[in-house]
Image (cartoon, rainbow, N blue to C red):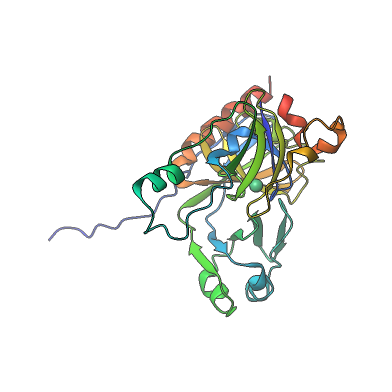
Amino acid sequence: MSDLMQATRRGVLDGMHGGSAVARLTPAAPASRISLRAPAASVEALSGALAVALPVKPKTSASANGRHALWIGPDEWLIIDESGADLVAEAGKSGALHSAADVSHRNTAVIVSGPKADVAINAGCPQDLSLAIFPVGACSRTLVGKAEVVLYRTAADTFRVEVWRSFAAYVFGLIAEGAEDAAL
Amino acid sequence: MLLIYCPYCEEERNELEFRNGGDAHIARPTNIADITDEEFEEYFFIRQNPKGLIYERWRHVHGCGKFFNAARDTVSDRFYLSYKAGEPKPDPATFLNNGNESALNKDKGASK
Ligand SMILES: [Zn+2]
């Protein structure tokens, strides 16, 4: 009889660390996420069902109880929940027209923090990340190098960089290089 | 580096976030199954490729994802203005040669 083999899920960024004295990179904890598409008429019902007010202003987000709703486009949001909730089911209870695709495993995230976190990200990202233009709570889909990411500023010196799993090592490495350059 | 104003994000973003979508305001024939090959060719392939002012579709593909239209100068690469998809073609007299540069506050990045 052969021994029972058990596969263990391993996050693509598990154990990775990097950065410098001015910008530190750490993998974010696993989270559930949905890519939510809906017309304006559904926003109120979905906000109620998800217990977080979907933002309708460009580049803004809303948070409640460890759940974050990020404006991506006029009819698109990225919802992130750190407690592992079933977001598709919750959105479904709204009864309003929408599309919710579970992207929990498509995305992972890098937390970039430190006094020059913005400089480290700007090594590969063309957006203006000054606090006046990209304040705390601001979010945006954009690019880091060749990879598409969603940036979310959670504190003056901290960004959550949501990235597709297959691009995660590349984005982590590029921002880590930027963090080292930022310390020079 | 070219900055392009996205009418949905309501701010200028780097050209890297955008993708060109060809000529704007090309109406798809409503009787598409009935038209001749020549008429289809005219609708589908034939473009003016003007030197100077052009109206184009652009997509903020690495941003909000939306298509919009923009008036651009093909020689200087200057973006005169951007407007949402579905909005009427703006009259060039309202943004060309009016000597009022400040009225074009949305395209200030085009010369960079
Ligand atoms: Zn946009």
Outermost residue, left side: A1
Residue A50: image quadrant is: bottom right
Residue A76: image quadrant is: bottom right
Viewer-proximal residue among B49 and B34: B34
Q: Residue at x 61, y 59 (%)?
A: A77
Q: Position of A31 compared to B68: left or right?
A: left
Viewer-proximal residue among A108 and A76: A76
Q: Is residue A31 above or below residue A180?
A: below
- Image quadrant containing the N terminus of chain A: bottom left
Q: Residue at x 45, y 55 (%)?
A: A105
Viewer-proximal residue among A102 and B65: B65
Q: Position of A69 compared to B62: left or right?
A: right
Q: Residue at x 74, y 43 (%)?
A: B91
Q: Position of A31 compared to B101: left or right?
A: left
* Residue A125 visible at all: no
Where is residue A25 shown, x and y percent of the image? 60, 38
- Image quadrant containing the C terminus of chain A: top right
* Residue A179 visible at all: yes
Where is residue A33 shown, x and y percent of the image? 54, 60
Residue A68: image quadrant is: bottom right
Q: Position of A2 compared to B83: left or right?
A: left
Q: Is residue A109 above or below residue A144?
A: below
Where is residue A66 shown, x and y percent of the image? 66, 62
Q: What is the total number of numbered labels drawn onto the structure image?
A: 0
Q: Is residue B81 above or below residue A7?
A: above
